Image: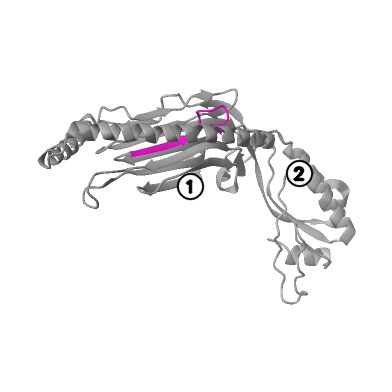
Amino acid sequence: MNENVKEIRKDLYKLRSDIRNESLKLRGVDIDKVKALEESIEKEHNNLIDRLHKIRISQGEARAKSQEKLMRIDKSALIKEANNKIQGLLKDYNLAYVLLCGCDYKEVCDFVYHGTEDEGIIIEDESGMNRVTVSGPYDANKMQAQPVVDINGNVPHNYIGQIFRYFVFQFKPGETRTYCIKPEIYLNGWWLIWPFNSGTCPPSDVINGRGTVWIKLRVQARQGEDLHEVEYVVVMEENIEAPGDREGPVYYITSANTKLQADLRANEHVAVIVSCEVYVETSNVCRAIVDLGSSPGFYFKVPKVDVGPLKKCFPWREGFVRSGALTELGSLIIKEERPKIDKDFPSEPDCLPGPCFTKFRPSLKQFNEKYRE
């Protein structure tokens, strides 16, 4: 932050404090007793949060074990099993063709590096009260970071804590075409917003605490000057004002929202950046926490990034499929899509679950003319 802006903000905090103290004096209020009461309430408030935190850590470690099982699953074996089942369907129903399209994930990107531990940390706490804690150590062996933002807000100040963590992978395309990029992303942790009321004569004198927390993910692919990226994926976002309060788990596993498709050039390195941003803000008396790191079971983790060419939809004739071609296609996605049929053809039949099949058998010439994309 610009040094001149910092000075202005410090003066703003001081002005707010002075206004409050002078206002209390004019009413004959003992400021020392008010501060002592606020400190006592804050201590009890934080004791309750600490007790709750221990419970949530225990629950989070149980969730981490379930995520660990997901990370160990052999997904290629699942794909092979699915392909075998599809082949069985084709034989049982004597089907003419199936449309195949989607991403053929053939490679795993190489891990290159992660950010530095003090990079991307923002603390706005010019009050001098040191009420914002931000940390986020990396563990390259586990491919994880453990960001934590904890704010213990106090009247009459505003506080902001923010942390940005990222991992960088790379690969080199073998040909110029559209590629699919699919990072595995896991988040596990806990969040809390407990604002508090202070003041003596409601409604005019009551000061409401307020807190905001959010977590966002982003996936980017950079090749030379070209940047391809998905929009920020909002994992969670909460904004709460006293007398409300809320807390809950942070739990995220890989979804379609963090997959990326990009047109890439052959034989030029592509950097894939997978990032997580955590933001916490409070006004007045409020404790707000996003915790992805206070326990071994809390983390932002990116074990790997899969990549492969995007296959446009194309039909596979029954004979080819029976010869084993489907198995060789590996991780192609089977979609419920059909080519358009002209009015002189029979109406389209209903689809079976999974891929879309039809028993209609056009001649090879008709097939090429009518089913071409």
Query: Where residue 285 appears, x then y in whole percent?
Result: 31, 39
Question: In the figure, residue 77 lies in which quadrant?
Answer: top right
Q: Residues within 10 Å of mark 2 (few under 14, many from 20)?
A: some
Q: Tell me which label, 2 or 1, sits earlier in the chain.
A: 2
* Stretch of the chain drawn in magenta: 286-301
Looking at the image, residue 82 sits to the left or right of residue 93; the answer is: left
Give percent across and percent down for residue 222: 51, 37
- Which residue lies at the image location 45% right of the left edge and 24% below the top edge? 116
- As shown in the figure, which amino acid type bears the numbered disc 2? Ile
Q: Left or right: where does residue 159 sit relative to residue 5? A: right
Q: Amino acid at mark 1?
A: Glu
> Residue tagged by mark 2?
79
Residue farthest to the bottom?
344
Which residue in the protein does label 1 denote? 231
* Image quadrant assignment for residue 73: top right
Viewer-nearest residue: 1 or 53: 53
- Viewer-closest of 216 and 109: 216
Marker disc for residue 24: none
Q: Is residue 92 visible?
A: yes
Percent of width and height locating residue 156: 24, 39
Q: Is residue 286 above or below residue 340?
A: above
Q: Residue at x 12, y 42 (%)?
A: 27
Q: Quadrant of the C terminus?
A: bottom right
Above-or-below relation of 301 to 27: above
**Residue density around tag 1, few if under 14, some if 14–19, many if 20 or more, within 10 Å:** few
Question: Looking at the figure, which quarter contains the N terminus?
Answer: top left
